[in-house]
């Protein structure tokens, strides 16, 4: 039986390995407010999944937990989560918005690998380790903002990405050596505050035809640091 919406009772404390694996109709999951743990692949390959709210009681997002959830558009990692294990959100092709909680300490290998619509990410100040390939091939990634000291970065963490990265002004841990070992094509700047908007520019314009409407994106960048301010 493949349901489109599931509300898991509050009495459930653990969601086991492969519990909802490849449930291709599942669009929305309501998790227990006192959930203590999830196991690997618990929601992997749920291709229709669009909405899931993670409870504050979790301290780990397991490996491959939501990998291949091709329609998941956003995710908020609660402040209680300290560790996101390998490939937890790999191949989430529609994922555009990710909010990482302030308690996060480690992002394992390949966590957001091949999330091509992810546009920006803020790394909380408590993060000390980002493992190899964590954000590789996020093709639309426009900005990475680090709020704290330079973390350990694994090989090719940002491989395949062309983006801007920002780090705190005056933080001596951000050395030139550190900035050369992230993979990808990254332009580095200190965090700009306040930003100075440039004039708006038009991007991704497509003219209307008889068969379909046209569209365009109006974008404003900061003239000082290059950060995309609005779209």
Image (spheres, rainbow, N blue to C red):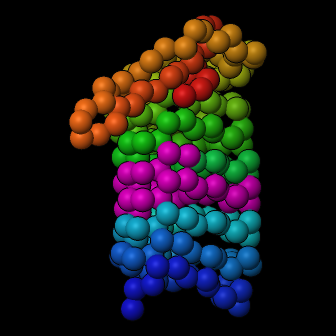
> What residue is drawn where x is 54% and y is 35%?
120
> What residue is drawn where x is 54% and y is 28%?
231
Q: How far across and how far down the image is residue 29, in percent?
A: 56, 74
Q: Does 227 lie within the magenta span?
A: no
Question: Which picture quadrant has residue 145?
Answer: top right
> What residue is drawn where x is 24% and y is 41%?
211
148 relative to 194, above or below: below
164 relative to 208, above or below: above
Outermost residue on the front side: it is 210
> Left of 218 or right of it: where is 104?
right
> Left of 77 or right of it: where is 163?
left
Residue 181 visible, this angle: no
Q: Does 78 lie within the magenta span?
A: yes
Looking at the magenta stretch, what is its main secondary structure? loop
Q: How far across and how far down the image is residue 155, in percent?
A: 40, 37
Q: How far across and how far down the image is residue 23, in percent?
A: 39, 78
> What residue is drawn where x is 60% and y is 9%?
198
In the picture, the quarter occupied by the N terminus is bottom left
Residue closest to the eye, 209 or 117: 209
186 relative to 9, above or below: above
Outermost residue on the left side: it is 210
Residue 167 visible, this angle: yes
Residue closest to the eye, 224 or 157: 224
How many numbered marks, from 0 up? 0
Q: Tell me the magenta residue range.
A: 68-97
Q: How far across and how far down the image is residue 209, in percent?
A: 25, 32
Residue closest to the eye, 83 or 230: 230
Residue closest to the eye, 107 or 10: 10
């Amino acid at each position: 039986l493949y349901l489109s919406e599931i509300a898991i009772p509050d009495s459930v404390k653990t969601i086991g390995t492969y519990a909802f694996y490849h449930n291709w109709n599942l669009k929305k999951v309501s998790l227990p407010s006192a959930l203590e743990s999830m196991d690997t692949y618990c929601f992997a390959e749920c291709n229709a999944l669009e909405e899931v709210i993670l409870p504050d009681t979790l301290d780990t997002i397991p490996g491959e937990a939501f990998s291949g959830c091709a329609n998941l558009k956003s995710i908020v990692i609660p402040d209680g989560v300290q560790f996101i294990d390998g490939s937890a959100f790999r191949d989430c092709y529609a994922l555009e918005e990710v909010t990482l909680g302030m308690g996060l300490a480690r992002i394992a290998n390949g966590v957001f690998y091949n999330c091509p619509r992810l546009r920006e990410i803020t790394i909380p100040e408590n993060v000390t380790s980002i493992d190899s390939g964590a954000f590789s091939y996020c093709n639309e990634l426009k900005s990475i903002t680090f709020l704290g000291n330079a973390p350990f970065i694994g090989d090719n963490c940002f491989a395949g990405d062309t983006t801007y990265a920002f780090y705190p002004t005056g933080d001596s841990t951000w050395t030139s050596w550190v900035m050369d070992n992230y993979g990808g094509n990254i332009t580095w700047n200190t965090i700009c505050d306040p930003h100075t908007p440039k004039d708006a520019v038009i991007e991704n314009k497509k003219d209307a035809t008889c068969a379909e409407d046209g569209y365009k994106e109006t974008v404003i960048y900061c003239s000082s640091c290059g950060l995309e301010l609005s779209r």
